[in-house]
Amino acid sequence: MSNEHVSNEGIAPNAKRLLWAGFMAIFAAGMGFGIRGGIFDNWGSEFGFTATQLGAIGGAGFTGFCFGIIIGGVICDKIGYSKLVIAAFALHVLSAVVTFMANTPANAYQMLTIGMFIFAFANGTLEAVANPLVATLFPKNRTHFLNILHASWPAGIVAGAAVGWVLDDKM
Protein backbone atom coordinates (compact mmCIF):
# COMPACT_ATOMS: atom_id res chain seq x y z
CA MET A 1 0.00 0.00 0.00
CA SER A 2 1.32 3.39 -0.93
CA ASN A 3 1.41 6.38 1.40
CA GLU A 4 1.04 8.64 -1.59
CA HIS A 5 -2.44 9.80 -0.57
CA VAL A 6 -1.96 9.79 3.19
CA SER A 7 -1.94 13.21 4.79
CA ASN A 8 1.02 14.27 6.90
CA GLU A 9 -0.95 17.12 8.36
CA GLY A 10 -2.05 17.03 11.96
CA ILE A 11 -5.48 17.99 13.19
CA ALA A 12 -4.12 20.93 15.20
CA PRO A 13 -2.11 23.89 13.92
CA ASN A 14 0.72 23.09 16.35
CA ALA A 15 0.71 19.32 15.78
CA LYS A 16 4.29 19.16 14.47
CA ARG A 17 5.57 21.28 17.38
CA LEU A 18 3.89 18.91 19.83
CA LEU A 19 5.36 15.93 17.97
CA TRP A 20 8.87 17.39 18.31
CA ALA A 21 8.27 18.29 21.96
CA GLY A 22 7.39 14.64 22.59
CA PHE A 23 10.38 13.56 20.52
CA MET A 24 12.75 15.69 22.59
CA ALA A 25 11.19 14.57 25.89
CA ILE A 26 11.65 10.90 25.00
CA PHE A 27 15.14 11.63 23.62
CA ALA A 28 16.06 13.25 26.95
CA ALA A 29 14.65 10.27 28.84
CA GLY A 30 16.77 7.92 26.73
CA MET A 31 19.81 10.10 27.37
CA GLY A 32 19.18 9.93 31.10
CA PHE A 33 19.07 6.14 31.01
CA GLY A 34 22.21 6.03 28.90
CA ILE A 35 24.12 8.40 31.16
CA ARG A 36 23.11 6.57 34.32
CA GLY A 37 24.03 3.26 32.74
CA GLY A 38 27.40 4.70 31.75
CA ILE A 39 28.26 5.72 35.30
CA PHE A 40 27.10 2.55 37.09
CA ASP A 41 30.65 1.33 37.51
CA ASN A 42 31.55 4.70 39.04
CA TRP A 43 28.80 4.21 41.60
CA GLY A 44 30.05 0.68 42.18
CA SER A 45 33.60 1.74 42.92
CA GLU A 46 32.66 4.92 44.82
CA PHE A 47 30.14 3.24 47.12
CA GLY A 48 31.36 -0.36 47.06
CA PHE A 49 28.29 -1.83 45.38
CA THR A 50 28.17 -5.40 44.18
CA ALA A 51 26.98 -6.24 40.68
CA THR A 52 23.72 -7.43 42.26
CA GLN A 53 23.17 -4.08 43.94
CA LEU A 54 23.91 -2.22 40.71
CA GLY A 55 21.47 -4.50 38.92
CA ALA A 56 18.80 -3.73 41.52
CA ILE A 57 19.36 0.01 41.07
CA GLY A 58 19.03 -0.38 37.29
CA GLY A 59 16.01 -2.65 37.76
CA ALA A 60 14.28 0.09 39.76
CA GLY A 61 14.48 2.13 36.57
CA PHE A 62 12.65 -0.46 34.51
CA THR A 63 10.05 -0.98 37.23
CA GLY A 64 9.46 2.75 37.58
CA PHE A 65 9.01 3.12 33.83
CA CYS A 66 6.40 0.35 33.79
CA PHE A 67 4.42 1.92 36.61
CA GLY A 68 4.70 5.38 35.06
CA ILE A 69 3.41 4.33 31.66
CA ILE A 70 0.60 2.17 33.07
CA ILE A 71 -0.65 4.70 35.63
CA GLY A 72 -0.12 7.63 33.27
CA GLY A 73 -1.93 5.81 30.47
CA VAL A 74 -4.91 5.08 32.68
CA ILE A 75 -5.31 8.64 33.95
CA CYS A 76 -4.08 10.81 31.05
CA ASP A 77 -7.50 11.36 29.53
CA LYS A 78 -9.10 11.87 32.93
CA ILE A 79 -6.80 14.58 34.28
CA GLY A 80 -5.32 15.96 31.06
CA TYR A 81 -1.99 15.73 29.31
CA SER A 82 -0.60 19.03 30.61
CA LYS A 83 -1.01 18.01 34.26
CA LEU A 84 0.89 14.80 33.59
CA VAL A 85 3.69 16.67 31.83
CA ILE A 86 3.96 19.04 34.81
CA ALA A 87 3.99 16.05 37.17
CA ALA A 88 6.71 14.39 35.08
CA PHE A 89 8.81 17.57 35.22
CA ALA A 90 8.42 17.77 39.00
CA LEU A 91 9.33 14.09 39.32
CA HIS A 92 12.45 14.60 37.20
CA VAL A 93 13.55 17.42 39.51
CA LEU A 94 12.80 15.25 42.56
CA SER A 95 14.77 12.34 41.07
CA ALA A 96 17.81 14.60 40.62
CA VAL A 97 17.54 15.82 44.22
CA VAL A 98 17.25 12.26 45.56
CA THR A 99 20.11 11.03 43.37
CA PHE A 100 22.42 13.82 44.55
CA MET A 101 21.55 12.94 48.16
CA ALA A 102 23.50 9.71 47.61
CA ASN A 103 26.71 11.03 49.10
CA THR A 104 27.85 8.34 51.54
CA PRO A 105 28.11 4.56 51.30
CA ALA A 106 25.55 4.35 54.11
CA ASN A 107 22.75 6.04 52.15
CA ALA A 108 23.83 5.63 48.52
CA TYR A 109 22.08 2.35 47.72
CA GLN A 110 18.72 3.55 49.01
CA MET A 111 18.95 7.03 47.47
CA LEU A 112 20.13 5.80 44.07
CA THR A 113 17.44 3.10 43.94
CA ILE A 114 14.69 5.56 44.88
CA GLY A 115 16.12 8.22 42.55
CA MET A 116 16.24 5.76 39.65
CA PHE A 117 12.67 4.63 40.29
CA ILE A 118 11.37 8.23 40.38
CA PHE A 119 13.37 9.14 37.27
CA ALA A 120 11.97 6.18 35.35
CA PHE A 121 8.44 6.79 36.64
CA ALA A 122 8.67 10.33 35.25
CA ASN A 123 9.90 8.96 31.91
CA GLY A 124 7.02 6.48 31.79
CA THR A 125 4.61 9.29 32.52
CA LEU A 126 5.98 11.29 29.58
CA GLU A 127 5.65 8.24 27.36
CA ALA A 128 2.05 7.81 28.52
CA VAL A 129 1.34 11.36 27.34
CA ALA A 130 3.34 11.35 24.11
CA ASN A 131 1.87 8.19 22.58
CA PRO A 132 -1.83 9.08 22.68
CA LEU A 133 -1.06 12.72 21.91
CA VAL A 134 0.76 11.88 18.68
CA ALA A 135 -1.81 9.24 17.73
CA THR A 136 -4.59 11.79 18.23
CA LEU A 137 -2.81 14.61 16.41
CA PHE A 138 -2.09 12.52 13.30
CA PRO A 139 -5.11 10.21 12.88
CA LYS A 140 -4.54 9.64 9.16
CA ASN A 141 -0.88 8.65 9.50
CA ARG A 142 -0.44 7.42 13.08
CA THR A 143 2.12 4.71 12.41
CA HIS A 144 4.47 7.03 10.57
CA PHE A 145 4.44 9.68 13.29
CA LEU A 146 4.60 7.18 16.16
CA ASN A 147 7.68 5.70 14.45
CA ILE A 148 9.26 9.16 14.35
CA LEU A 149 8.39 9.69 18.01
CA HIS A 150 9.86 6.37 19.07
CA ALA A 151 13.07 6.81 17.12
CA SER A 152 14.02 9.30 19.80
CA TRP A 153 14.38 6.64 22.53
CA PRO A 154 17.27 4.67 20.99
CA ALA A 155 18.83 7.90 19.72
CA GLY A 156 18.75 9.25 23.27
CA ILE A 157 20.23 6.06 24.69
CA VAL A 158 23.10 6.18 22.19
CA ALA A 159 23.76 9.87 22.92
CA GLY A 160 23.48 9.29 26.68
CA ALA A 161 25.77 6.27 26.56
CA ALA A 162 28.38 8.40 24.79
CA VAL A 163 28.06 11.08 27.47
CA GLY A 164 28.17 8.40 30.20
CA TRP A 165 31.28 6.92 28.62
CA VAL A 166 32.97 10.34 28.64
CA LEU A 167 31.87 10.98 32.24
CA ASP A 168 33.05 7.50 33.21
CA ASP A 169 36.57 8.34 32.05
CA LYS A 170 36.52 11.70 33.85
CA MET A 171 35.35 10.42 37.23
Image (cartoon, grey):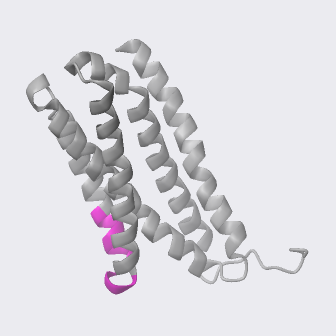
Q: Is residue 112 left or right of residue 129?
A: left
Q: Is residue 94 left or right of residue 159?
A: left
**Residue 126 position in % (x across, y down):** 41, 62
Looking at the image, can residue 125 be seen? no
Looking at the image, can residue 8 be seen? yes
Q: Examine the image and state in which quarter residue 39 appears.
A: top left
| Residue 78 highlighted magenta (yes or no) | yes
Q: Which quadrant does the N terminus fall into?
A: bottom right
107 up-or-down from 124: above or below: above
Residue plotted at (30% across, 65% down) = 86
Give the residues drawn in magenta, as a range. 77-87
Residue plotted at (63% across, 84% down) = 11
166 up-or-down from 79: above or below: above
Q: Nearer the viewer, residue 170 or 49?
A: 49
Residue plotted at (30% across, 39% down) = 56
**Residue 121 position in % (x across, y down):** 32, 57
**Residue 34 position in % (x across, y down):** 46, 36
**Residue 78 position in % (x across, y down):** 34, 86
Q: Main secondary structure of the magenta part?
A: helix
Residue plotted at (27% across, 32% down) = 53
| Residue 105 highlighted magenta (yes or no) | no
Residue at the left extreme, as displayed? 106
164 up-or-down from 142: above or below: above
